């Protein structure tokens, strides 16, 4: 099993980037983790659907042979325990999982339609950098839950 996190752009805020890196490093102790940061499309005069489509094509290149999970506010909500059990189930079935986080305009219709599942990281719309932080922390937490470690209380 391989866990892929495919995201649009790099974190611009250094403190947020450090927090993301810290949780991704911790999560990689539990799950084989590959992080792919794809280039943001230039919004300029481009319409949001065009930007989403351009970024969607870049994200799709990172998710081949994976169970694609689109991080989207309309998705399924899990408790930390249920997320850990779901992820462990994917490991037991030896299925690669790719979590996809869109850019400023969200995910393309193609990514959303082709995803095996949509996952809501919160009931609110989150900036993509913050969504990545939440996801990386939950991947770390899921690993600690699966191993019965004390991080999750």
Image (cartoon, rainbow, N blue to C red):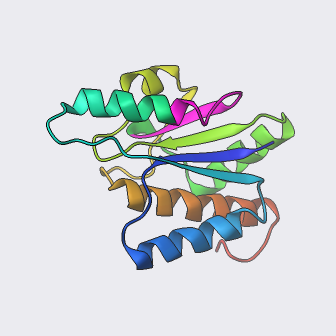
Residue 62 belongs to magenta span: yes
Q: How far from the left and from the top, in percent, is residue 76?
A: 48, 38
Q: How far from the left and from the top, in percent, is residue 24?
A: 63, 65
Q: How far from the left and from the top, in percent, is residue 31?
A: 76, 55
As rendered, which of 126 and 145 lies closer to the eye?
Answer: 126
Highlighted magenta segment, given as a residue range: 59-72
Q: Residue at x 77, y 47 (%)?
A: 88
* Count of marks placed on residues: 0
39 w.r.t. 109: above or below: below
Q: Which residue is drawn at 28% across and 41% down?
A: 105
10 w.r.t. 151: above or below: above
Q: In this view, does 147 lie to the left or right of 34?
A: right
Q: Is residue 135 left or right of residue 55?
A: right
Residue projecting furthest to the left: 45
Q: Which residue is drawn at 36% across and 45% down?
A: 103
- Image-quadrant location for residue 112: top left
Tell me the quadrant of the picture where the N terminus can be found: top right
127 w.r.t. 63: above or below: below
């Amino acid at each position: 099993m391989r866990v892929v996190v495919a995201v649009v752009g790099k974190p611009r805020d250094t403190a947020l980037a450090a927090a993301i890196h810290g949780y991704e490093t911790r999560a990689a102790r539990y799950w084989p983790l590959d992080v792919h940061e794809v280039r943001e499309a230039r919004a300029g005069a481009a319409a949001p659907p065009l930007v989403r489509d351009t970024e969607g094509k870049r994200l799709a290149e990172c998710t081949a042979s994976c169970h694609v999970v689109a991080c989207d506010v309309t998705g399924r909500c899990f408790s930390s325990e249920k997320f850990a059990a779901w992820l462990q189930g994917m490991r037991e079935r030896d299925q690669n999982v790719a979590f996809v986080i869109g850019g400023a305009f969200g995910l393309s219709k193609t990514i959303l339609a082709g995803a095996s599942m949509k996952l809501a990281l919160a009931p609110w719309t989150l900036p993509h950098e913050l969504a990545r932080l939440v996801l990386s922390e939950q991947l770390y937490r899921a690993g600690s839950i699966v191993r019965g470690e004390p991080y999750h209380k």
